[in-house]
Image: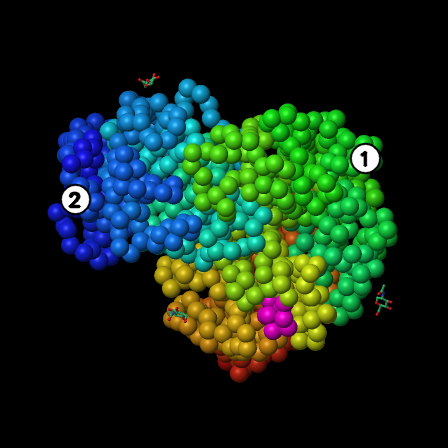
Amino acid sequence: MITIKNVLCNQLVKRCSFALRSSEIRFLFMLFTMIVTLTLVTVVHAVIHVQSPSDPVLRTSFTIDDNELEFGNIPKALRFDCHPEDGASQLSCTNRGCCWDPMDDVNDSGNLYALDAPVCYYPENWPSYEFINSTIEGKDFSGFLTRKVKSFYNNDIPIIKMETTTLSHSILRVKIHDPQSPRYEPPWPVKSNWKISNVKDSSPKYIFQTDSSRPGFAIKRAADNNTIFDAIGKGGFIFSDQFLQISSLLPSHNVYGLGEHRTRLKLNTNWNSFTMFNKDQPPTERVNLYSSHPFYIVIEESGDCHGVLFLNSNAMDIILQPAPAITFRTIGGIFDFYFFMGPTPADVLRQYAEVVGKPFFPPYWSLGFHLCQLGYGSVSKTREVWNRTRNARIPFDTQWNDIDYMENRNDFTYDKKNFKDLPQFVDEIHLAGMHYIPMIDAGIAAAEKAGTYLPYDEGLRDDVFVKDAETNQPFIGKVWNPIATVWPDFTHPKSAMYYFRMLKTMHDMFAFDGLWIDMNEPSNFLNGKVNGCTYNKFDYPQYVPHVVDRLLATKTLCMNAKHHLDSHYNLHNTYGTGQAIVSNLAMKKIRMKRPFIISRATWEGAGHYAGHWTGDVYSSWHDLRMSIPEVLAYSLFQVPMVGADICGFDGNTSVPLCNRWVQLGAFYPFARNHNSDDTIVQDPVAMGALVVKSARKALLIRYRFLPYLYTLFFKAHKFGDTVARPLFVEFTNDKNTYNIDKQFLWGKSLMIIPVLEENKVEVTAYIPPGPWYDFYTKAFISSTGKNFTLKAPLDTIPLMIRGGSILPGQTPNVTTTLSRKNKFELLVALDYKGLATGELYWDDGDSLDSLEKQQFRWLNFTVKGQKLRNREVEKGNFSQHMILGRVSVMGVSRKVHRVFLNDNSSIPFTYDISRLYLNVKGLYVDLKRKFTLSWAFEE
Ligand SMILES: *[C@@H]1O[C@H](CO)[C@@H](O)[C@H](O)[C@H]1NC(C)=O
Ligand SMILES: *[C@@H]1O[C@H](CO)[C@@H](O)[C@H](O)[C@H]1NC(C)=O
Ligand SMILES: *[C@@H]1O[C@H](CO)[C@@H](O)[C@H](O)[C@H]1NC(C)=O
Ligand SMILES: *[C@@H]1O[C@H](CO)[C@@H](O)[C@H](O)[C@H]1NC(C)=O
Ligand SMILES: *[C@@H]1O[C@H](CO)[C@@H](O)[C@H](O)[C@H]1NC(C)=O
Ligand SMILES: *[C@@H]1O[C@H](CO)[C@@H](O)[C@H](O)[C@H]1NC(C)=O
C-alpha cells in the first residue's frame, strides 16, 4: 500500500473503464469541462461574482493501492507529464504525488524526447496553489494565491499574484507573478509603445474565470461561451524560481504558430514538443532553431479564431497533446499571457500586432530580387556574378556579400586586398539603380592588437560587452574572428550609440544600403568559454528544456554571463532582436531613409525592426517544400519580410531543384538566392538556360505586381495584415484549407501553386469555392472547393487570380528603379456578379516619413456594373506621375461593343470572346485624379 495525500489518479473516468475511442474521449472532455465549469467561482465581466464551496470529492485525501495507481485511467490523451526529466521510475513518480502507468507501447529509445503519452502523469487536481483572496476593480481581476504543497522543484514562490488587464475588448492580458520580489520580464516588445484603443464602453469578447480552490484560470468566448483556454486544475501548475508550468485544454486541433520550428503549418497535436531557445541550427524537424515565437492561433470548431501569446523569453518547452491540450514549461520569468479574441484570423493577427508591434515599412527596392554567395572571395568575382545576372536581363535589385568581404572576418572592416575596390563597386551598383547589403555578425573580434581595431577598443571603453560572471570582464568565446570574440550587450544604454558609430564609420568607407545581421542567437563555436561554463544555477538548472544536446550553453554563451539588464539565461532569446533594434536605429540615422535589416535570430516583435531568412536550409526537395510553412508561420509572427535561400544554402543544388526553387522564391516576400562556399555556384546564369528562363519569367511577374506586393507590405505595416497568406486566413469557413501549406496567397487575390517534386509538370492544388482565373491562360474555374490538376511546364509556376480582385501592377523592368518609371496597369478579375475591388498604396518608396507627411497616394478601385472607378482611401499629397497605361478584365462574359473613358470618349480595346478577356491598352490616365472606365455590351 502506498499512501498519498490529495491524489486522485482518476476518480472521474474510473467509472468508464473501457477502451476509449476518440469520440468518447471528446465526450469525456465535455463531461470533464462541465464538471470543472460547475466549480468555477470567479466570473469577471459577468454580473454576479459567486463564491462556491470547493468540491469535496476532488479534495479528499486518498489511500490508493498499487493497482489503482498503476492503472489510474485518465485517458492517455489527457495525461499531463509529471516527470519531464529523464529517468522516471515508479518511485520518483509517486513521490511527486503522480500516477504511474508504464504502457507496453512506450518508446524508451533513450535520448529522443518521448513523444508519447507520459508514463508518469498528474492526477486530477494535483495540489499546488489556491486563492487567498481576489478582487475585481472595473473590468480587471486581481487575486493572490498561496502555495499549499511544495513542488519537487527548488524555490517555489510562496505567494503569487494573478492579475488581468483589459487592453481592449478583444485583448486580455493575464499576468501571474511574484508580488514580493519582481522577476525578470523581457525588455521587448516595448510595452510603452502600446497605443491600444481604449474601448471602455463596448463589452469584452472574453470572459475570465478562476476557481478559488485551484490554480490557473479559464477564458471563454463571450459570444458563444466556448472555452478557449482552460488551465484550471489541469496538469501540474508550478511556479518555482526556475520551473514554471501551466497546462490548458485547447478547443480544437487547428493550432498554428509556435516557431521557429520545422513543422507543417498546422501543428501536430499528437504529442509534440516545441522547444524555444535560439540556436544556430540548420532547420531540422523536432529541434530548436534560430528564433523563438511563443505565439499560437487556434481555429475553433465554430470557425472563430483566437490567438495566445506567452510573453516569456526563457528557454522553454511547449507541448501539444491530443486532448487537445497545451503545456507551457519555462525555466524563468513569469506567466504573462495575452489573449486575442479575433474572431477572424486577420483580426487575431491585427490584435497581436498591437502588442508586439507592427512590421517595419520596407523600402521599395527591397522587394526586388537579391543575390549572394558566401565565398565570392573578391570584388571581381562578386562583380562578375552581378554583371552576368544583369546581362541575362534577370530582374535584380540587390547584391550582397557574406563574411568573406571582411578583413579577418571582423565586423565594420573590409578586406583591403581582395575587396580593395568595394567602395567603387558599391558606387557602381548605385549608378545602376541597384543596392548593396553586407553581413554583420553579432560577435566582435577580441584579439586584434590594441589600437588596430576600434570596434573592440571603443566597446571596451564604453563597457558595452556582455560580461563573464566570474571575472566581470567581457565574456570571451570564439566565432569567425581570429582567436577570440566578445559580444555587444544590446541592453546596455550605450550600445545604440556604439553601434551607430561603428556602422557610420563603415558606411563612410562604402555606402551600403541595408544590413544582414547573423550569428545573433548568439552563436559561438564553443560551448560557453574555452573550458565550458562553471557549475551554476543558470547553466545547470534543475530542469533543462529539450534543447539540442540538453545543455543550454551549447554553441552559445554561458547562461550566467551578465548583460546590463539581466543574465544571459533570461535574455538569450531576445539577443538577435536587440541587435536588430540598434541596427535599425543606426541605419535610419545614417541613411535618413527606410532601414532594411534581415536577421537570423528573432523574438516577439522583431518584425518591427527587421525581416528574417530561414537560415542554413539544405538544397533538397524536402527543404524546398518545408520553406512554405516556415514563411507562412513568420507571417503569423508579424515578420512578413521572410524567405528561404533560393535553391538552398548547404549542399549542391541541381538544375531541376533550382529551377522550381527560383519559381517559388520569386514569390517569397523576401526573394534572395544565396548559398554556401563549399557548394556549386548557383546564381541563375551559372545554373544554365532553363533556370535563367524560369528566373526571368517568374521574377518578371513578381516585378509586374510589385505595386500589389508593396500595398500588402503597407497594410502589414499599418494594420498587421499578412503578405504571404495561408489559405485559412482568407477561407476560414472552409475546413479544407486548414491543412494546406503547399500553396499560399499574396494578400487575398493571388494564389501561388509551386511544383515541389522532381520531374513533375503538373500539380494538384486545392481551389477554394468561388471564381478563379488562371493567370496565364485567363481560363475560368468555378470551384465548389475541390482539387484541380494544373499544368506546370518546366519554366512555369501555376498562379491563380481570385475572382472579385483588382491587382495593381506596373510594366516590369530589370530593376525597381526602372520599373517604377513605367505606367501602371490594373488586372481585374470579376466575380460571379461582375464585381471586383482592389487597392494601391504608392509613395517614393524610400522616405522615412511618407506616412507622417502624407507623401503618398492610397487608392482603391471598384468595378460594378461594367464600370471601373478609383477613390482615395485616405488623403495623400504625393505628387509624382502615376499614369495608368492599361486595364485588362477577366471574366467579361458578353461581347464588348464599346469602351468609354470618363463616360464620354470611346477608346480602342480588344475583346477575346473565347477567353472572356477585355484588354484596354495605350491609356494615359492620371491615377491621382478620379476616373471611370466602362464597357458596354452589344445590344
Ligand atoms: C490578499 O492577500 C495578500 C497576501 O496575503 C495581501 O497582501 C492583500 O492585501 C490581500 N488583498 C485583499 C484585497 O485582501
Ligand atoms: C453564456 O452563459 C451564461 C451563463 O451561463 C448565459 O447567461 C449566457 O446566455 C450564455 N451565452 C450564450 C451566448 O450562450
Ligand atoms: C560586364 O558585362 C559586359 C557586357 O557583357 C562586359 O562588356 C564587361 O566586360 C563585363 N564586366 C565585367 C567586369 O565582367
Ligand atoms: C486534395 O488533395 C490532397 C492531397 O492529395 C488531399 O489530401 C485532400 O484531401 C484533397 N482535398 C479535397 C477537397 O479533395
Ligand atoms: C527597361 O529599361 C531600359 C533602360 O532604361 C529601357 O531601354 C527599356 O525600354 C525598359 N524596358 C521596359 C519594358 O520598360
Ligand atoms: C474605397 O474608398 C472609399 C473612400 O475611403 C470608401 O468609401 C469605399 O468604401 C472604398 N471601397 C472599397 C471597395 O474599399
How busy is the neighbourhood of tag 1: few (under 14 within 10 Å), some, or many (20 plus)? few
**Image x and y of residue 850, in percent:** 67, 45
**Closest to the observer: 187 or 207?**
187
Does the rendering let one see residue 554? yes
Q: Are marks 1 and 2 in contact (CB under 8 Å)?
A: no
Q: Secondary structure at mark 1?
A: loop
What residue appears at the point 44 percent right and 21 percent down from the top-left corner?
181
Amino acid under label 2? Asn
What residue appears at the point 44 percent right and 63 percent down from the top-left corner?
740
Q: Residue furthest bottom?
A: 914
Count numbered badges in the picture.
2
Decide whether the magenta segment is chiefly helix, strand or loop. helix
Q: Nearer the viewer, mark 1 or mark 2?
A: 2
Does the rendering let one see residue 781? no
Mark number displayed over residue 67? 2
Q: Which span is picked out in magenta?
A: 653-661
Q: Is residue 476 left or right of residue 56?
A: right
Mark number displayed over residue 449? 1
**Image x and y of residue 234, in percent:** 28, 39
**Image x and y of residue 531, in percent:** 61, 36
Q: Is residue 454 left or right of residue 10?
A: right
Q: Secondary structure at mark 2?
A: helix
Instruction: Establish if 764 lies above or below 479.
Output: below
Locate the N terminus and report the quarter of the image it occupies. top left
- Let me know if residue 654 is in the magenta part: yes
**Closest to the observer: 442 or 133?**
442
